[in-house]
Image: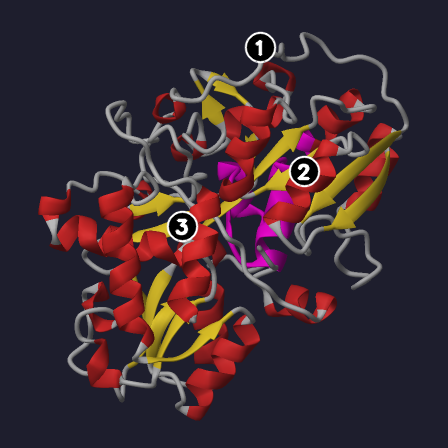
Amino acid sequence: MRTPHSLKAALAVGVLLLTAACGSSGSSGSASSGLNPPDLKAQSKLGKSEGQVNLIAWAGYVEDGSDDPKVDWVSGFEKQTGCQVKSKTAASSDEMVSLMKTGQYDAVSASGDASLRLIASGDAAPVNTSLIANYKDVFAGLKNQAWNTVKGVNYGVPHGRGANLLMYNTEKVKPAPTSWSAVFDKSSAYKGKVTAYDSPIYIADAALYLMKTKPSLGIKNPYALDQKQFDAAVDLLKEQNKNIGEYWSDYLKEISAFKSGNSVVGTTWQVIANTTQSEGVKVKAVIPKEGATGWSDTWMISAKAKHPNCAYQWLNWIISPKVNAQVAEYYGEAPSNAKACKLTADKSLCATYHASDESYWKNVHYWTTPIQQCVDGRTDVKCVPYAKWVQAWTEIKG
């Protein structure tokens, strides 16, 4: 599950849960070539607006001023296009997938654990990016990636991105950690004060660590794990479980744990680190030497969309410079449109979130749905699909 990252957005929705998703850095759509989605065609031209668009979104992505009168990028869209927005906030990627299957929605802000499922099932339509004027300004590092592009065909537009970082209390964790060993191999040094992301996708974090520290396993992509590789990652997490103080699925809970001292080291997001620091706790968040997992959500159009022209206009609107800047700042993420950086109220936002620093993102392995056809290109083995990740996560915590 995915939730808003900004504190304002968090308070607006009240309940905060996590995304379960997965991916690989620097990977192109060819990494998903094992998929054989239905032969659907992208829309060739824009037609007349239908007057309405039905959206499924994460909280904080479709704001119309009802939560905060100062936060509204829906009204401008409705006025400009004549498309009235109806949106449903989803609590999980599974919910998004189920809702898209009904055919009642036109577009969805899908995370990596949902996007390939929607493509493979034929619920998401190919997207003609030439009909989306603002797509040209999307950061190159977010285009044509494995979580939303298959065999060179685009299935959506990137919304924004973020990395899963290692946060530590600088007064309690010394020397300053530079490796994920701080929460894996050396975690016993902080027994009971280690925190971890409460989601099956956290298995990928263990796989990433093993990819760098146990090359004999042959892991090339933390989301493409054969049974032996998967078992190794699960075993590592079962060992880590002995040292976990709590798994966090509410980022306000993680902030509280670091403030009280119940947690001193663990996985975090940049916005959590920012908020924790602002509340007087001496913490730092880094990408360790092994790299990190991360995410980029994709706005996708339903293959059964009843309002496809309004859906295309929404995709163009949500990644337009001004709106993309508003969403990124409210939500707490790096924008996808390069021109958005000059339009944020906080002029340091893009620097804080490394929006244009591609050298930073090259070590981030973006979420991409684990599927049986290994997304690392292997054809001689079958990889463990996401449903098995969910099952294993229950065993790890149990």
Asked if the stretch drawn in magenta spans residue 113, the answer is no
Q: Residue 154 shows which numbered tag?
A: none
Task: Examine the structure image and report whether residue 320 is included in the region drawn in magenta.
Answer: yes
Quadrant containing the C terminus in the rendered view: bottom left
Residue 179 in sight in this render: yes
Residue 1, placed above or below residue 240: above
Q: Residue 263: image x %, image y %?
A: 38, 83
Q: Earlier in the sequence, mark 3 or mark 2?
A: 2
What amino acid does circle 1 point to? Asp
Q: In the rendered view, does 202 fall on the left or right side of 338?
A: left
Q: Is residue 15 left or right of residue 64?
A: left
Q: Which residues are magenta?
A: 315-344
Q: How many marks?
A: 3
Q: Is residue 38 above or below residue 61?
A: above
Q: Residue at x 12, y 52 (%)?
A: 214
Quadrant location of the N terminus? Answer: bottom right
The tag earlier along the polypeptide, 1 or 2, is 1
Image location (x, y in percent) of residue 72: 77, 52
**Where residue 294 is drawn, which disc sits there?**
3
Whichever of labels 1 and 3 marks the residue nearer the N terminus, that label is: 1
What residue is shown with label 1?
39
Name above or below for residue 25 compared with residue 2: above
- Judging by the rendered image, the residue that carries numbered circle 2 is 108
User: Residue 256, image x and y in percent?
Assistant: 51, 84
SS category of the residue bearing label 2: strand
